[in-house]
Image (tube, rainbow, N blue to C red):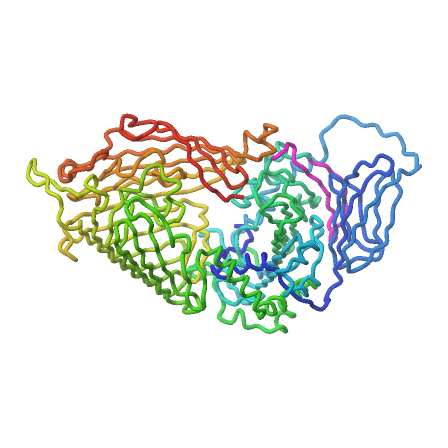
Amino acid sequence: MQFKLKTEKITKKTTYRLLLLTLIITMLSGSVFAQLTKIMGTVSDSATGEPMPFVNIVFKGTNTGITSDFDGNYAIETLHASDTLIASFVGYEKIKSAVVIGKFQIIDFKMKSSSVMLQDVVIRPGKNPAEILLDSIIAHKEQNDPDHFDAYQYEAYTKIELDANNITEKFQNRRMYRPFKFIFDNVDTSTVNGKTYLPIFLSETISDVYARKDPNGYIEKIKATKISGFNNQSAMQLLSDEYFNTNIYDNFIDLFQVNFVSPIAGNGLSFYKYYLVDSAYLEGRWCYKVMFKPRYKQTMTFTGNMWIHDSTYAVKEIEMRMAEDANMNFVNDLVIDKTFDIVDGEHWALTRDYTIGDFNLIENNKRTLGFFGKKTTTYRNYIIDEPKDPKFYTAPVDVIVSDSADKHDDTFWLENRHEDLTKDERTIYFMIDTLTTIPQFKTYIDIVEMVVTGYYVKGKFEIGPYASMLSFNAVEGARFRFGGRTSNKFSKKIMIGGYAAYGTFDGRFKYGGNVLYMFDKNPRRALSASFRYDLEQLGASQNAFREDFFLAFLFRRQPADKLSFVEEIKLSYEHEWFRGFSTSFILMNRNLYPVGGAKFQFYVQEGETQKVETEDAITSAEFGLDFRFAYKERVTIGEFERISLGAKFPIIDIKYAYGMPNFFKSDYEYHKLQIGIKHWFNILNFGWSRFNVEAGRIWGTLPYPLLKLHEGNETYFFDESAFNMMNYYEFVSDKYLKFYYTHHFNGLLFNRIPLFRKLKWREVGFVTGLIGGMDQKNRDFSVWPQGMYTLDKPYFEAGAGIENIFKIIRIDAIWRLSYLDHANVSPFGVRASLVFKF
């Protein structure tokens, strides 16, 4: 059990506005509450110019200081500065430099060798003392790891800050920012990498956390929250997300779904070099300082230092920075700083956790706008190994937000926040409220929201998606579509949407509508109803290109002439019983009409030889029951939508449907059962894998459109949920088993090849297969179109690819390994896709 706040939810609207505020910079001045002094610089030998690591740099008359890193760099950010900074190192003269308190400054030290004669030293071979200390750290990991507690509770205070960075003078003088010129009075400089930045968002939360190990239980009660410019419960829950919470006692630290090797991993010597550089009393406890750096290039490791308690071998403090050449996208820098203390006279526990990340679309670019993400969490009032009654930990949700959480005044925060706000932090609260009153700022928000969401928001309505307003296919020719939905200003409980479309070739109107009513967002309880009369590609995967996407026609391998008309009415209710387990009840009526020409008309067998075209649609009515189990799943929650961010354990989906004859003129009775399991996981530091397994069975006598049409892909875009070398309508089954397995190597091989190392390309491979069958009664019932088959042997595809080309492009070479004698198929193909991954 790690000490971590686990709520990872934020409204869709809030997410967009955080992005907007990063792009459309924000404002205002504030009073100085604390004299924060920021200094950074380098230390070098005055004679040779070479950088000097391990140099002690301390404010005169204080215990505040730091040691220069392996490249001679240092940075200090403190409220406890004096007017003099001193640099010292054995064999060199001390150097003093004047400091301007409360300002950012760069102070470089050029160390001069002293004339003091040192006594002879005899060096004998032996084990590195830092490695001896590491052995003791590893031997005592289990007893020092906070995860070993049977139960714990504490109060947590969390601050999250977002800063727009790379705020250059040229950027400030752009015409679009002239109405907000006054906001740039608050530009500051970071000691992380010397970038200028402007604070734009701040949130604070105070919560009580209760956890036990066996049986597993976790409850977080958010009792106070304060957010600059935003006010809703879903946004409050972002303040306890899991992304930047890490346990250094684990062998691997998961950041952005990538395994980084911990500096105190059991096999740390295989990945790090260690140096014992200092010893001192920290808060009355004698500790040793160890510095560490990566042993090899472009490995997922850190560089930094840690203080180790001399008798318990527990980590007292650690500061680690993502290796400069780590193969990561969009993260230019990442620093994690943790402090541990003995909280009850016996147990070491985390008392402060600080993380700052520098994010930018372009690596190490100081001209393109990016942002800093900062998270500070402090912990106090620990109670260890005093579990509450098991019933206390049982609740539908892990995180409970108090009704009065956002109603506390400034006096409450002054008395209860764990640490004072800095000048930057106090500025933000007034900044956001001021900006939102400026008309030009509101206009910029509308434009960027339209780009991000695909909808243009106009008061209580949203028009879109604009990417589907014009498209092309072989059945409709040019397709024109206009639609929209209600916005959150209309209601946060009910959303109504609809659209109408027209094709120039077929001359037919299509339309659809939907309504969604939210009884509760967390746990999710929602009722929805929809209807549509439109074209559909049977046998397409859930991740396939929308047929009405305006550029879809450019990427098709074959004309889109296998479409069917669907007339559908659907009613569903989703009930989340507790976090990770939900049930959906579905009632649906569908009419299928063939529109792809005589080749794709629906026929059934009448007698032994006569073929009769169906005069009306294939009509079905079914009741469905879906179960979804995703233990410890991470999600983002909007007012109406929920997006899964994955789970630490496999996600299981079970779907059952019963076809009801004579209901809504349904012609068929059947049972359908589908079971799916999917999961992703890291494999040490060798990359990460994902697998999907799905099995299904259909009982009943049905025409082929109601059987399982296996997912093909007739585009040049790679689709992980489909068989990319299979055509639509190529295979049909009433019982099947399919699997997909992929492994992303994260540059495991390419990082060892100089050219590829510079390009930061990454290797990926996959294999997918399908086994299926068909009852004889279903073989005899339908007259199948030409090119449709059953599976009398397994179907396989395999592929190898390169991803991270220009950070977002993936290219796959794919081999079809079976059924090569079918018409209009190829044994080999190349597919492309756009992938955004860290």
Residue 130's x, y, as percent?
Answer: 71, 36
Residue at image coords 51%, 43%:
837
Q: Is residue 835 left or right of residue 166?
A: left
Q: Where's the C terminus, which quadrant?
A: top right
Residue 797 picture location, percent across and down:
36, 31
Q: Which residues are magenta?
A: 274-298
Q: Is residue 349 visible?
A: no
Q: Is residue 328 above or below residue 429?
A: above
Q: Which residue occupies the foreground of this view, 727 or 464?
A: 464
Please provide percent x and percent y for residue 688.
48, 38
Q: Is residue 749 above or below residue 90?
A: above
Q: Is residue 79 left or right of residue 447?
A: right
Query: Residue 40 magenta-drawn?
Result: no
Which one is in front, 703 or 180?
180
| Res. 559 image quadrant | top left
> Main structural element of the magenta stretch: helix, strand or loop?
strand
Residue 311: x %, y % from top left = 69, 44
Asked if residue 646 can be seen in this view, the reply is yes
Location of residue 69 with respect to 488 vertically, above or below: above
The one nearer the camera, 9 or 835, is 835
155 with respect to 622 (left or right): right
Check residue 281 for magenta coloring: yes
